[in-house]
Image (cartoon, grey):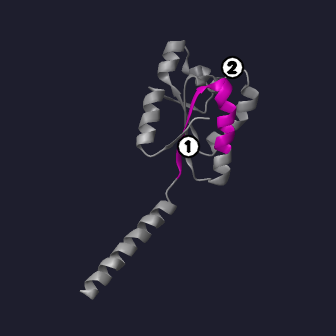
């Protein structure tokens, strides 16, 4: 009986250590939600830069819809400020997703956006899908 209990305890401790070790090396996955470029974009980009400076292997997706897509447009009023940040973050693996429903509703064209932008059929659906895949949700 003691041998059985000792074996069960050993198996339990091994499982706890294995789960802890796996959790410790799990990749950080974050989705940043931008729906108001004027009030959220620059702060969000700086937050992303800080996160990557602290945890360089973070997997980060920025989902923009509604008025949030503006900062990814070539004609954005603060393009000189956010443009270099977008390019630098994209070079570090950050994905920038623009909502195609917003494009349709605002009569925008894909060629009005910076080259670093990708497109998703629905920003809200993309946010939901990423959260279901374990991405932490941040709204700057």
User: Over which residues does the magenta segment extend?
Assistant: 28-49
Q: Are marks 2 and 1 in contact (CB under 8 Å)?
A: no
Instruction: Find out whether residue 19 is within the magenta segment.
Output: no
Q: Tell me the SS state at disc 1.
A: strand
Residue 129 shows up from this direction? yes
Q: Quadrant of residue 81?
A: top right
Badge 2: residue crowd in 10 Å (few <14, some 14–19, many ≥20): few
The residue that label 1 is drawn on is 60
**Viewport quadrant of the N terminus:** bottom left
Q: Quadrant of residue 8?
A: bottom left
The residue that label 2 is drawn on is 75
Q: Residue at x 65, y 30 (%)?
A: 40
Q: Position of residue 98 (x, y in %)?
A: 53, 27
In the image, which is nearer the foreground, mark 2 or mark 1?
1
Q: Residue at x 62, y 54 (%)?
A: 55
Instruction: Find out whether residue 43 is within the magenta segment.
Output: yes
Q: Position of residue 54 (x, y in %)?
A: 66, 53
Q: Position of residue 84 (x, y in %)?
A: 72, 35
Q: Position of residue 129 (x, y in %)?
A: 41, 37
Which residue reaches farthest bottom? 2
**Viewport quadrant of the C terminus:** top right
């Amino acid at each position: 009986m003691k041998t059985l209990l000792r074996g069960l305890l050993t198996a339990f401790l091994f499982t706890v250590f294995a789960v802890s070790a796996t959790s410790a090396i799990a990749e950080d996955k974050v989705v940043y939600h931008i729906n108001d470029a004027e009030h959220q974009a620059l702060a969000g980009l700086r937050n992303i830069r800080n996160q990557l400076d602290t945890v360089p292997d973070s997997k980060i997706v920025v989902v923009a819809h509604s008025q949030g897509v503006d900062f990814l447009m070539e004609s954005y009023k603060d393009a000189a400020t956010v443009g270099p940040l977008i390019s630098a973050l994209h070079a570090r693996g950050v994905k920038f997703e623009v909502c195609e429903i917003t494009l349709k509703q605002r009569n925008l064209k894909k060629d009005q956006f910076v080259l670093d932008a990708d497109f998703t059929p629905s920003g809200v659906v993309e946010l939901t899908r990423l959260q279901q895949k374990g991405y932490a949700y941040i709204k700057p």
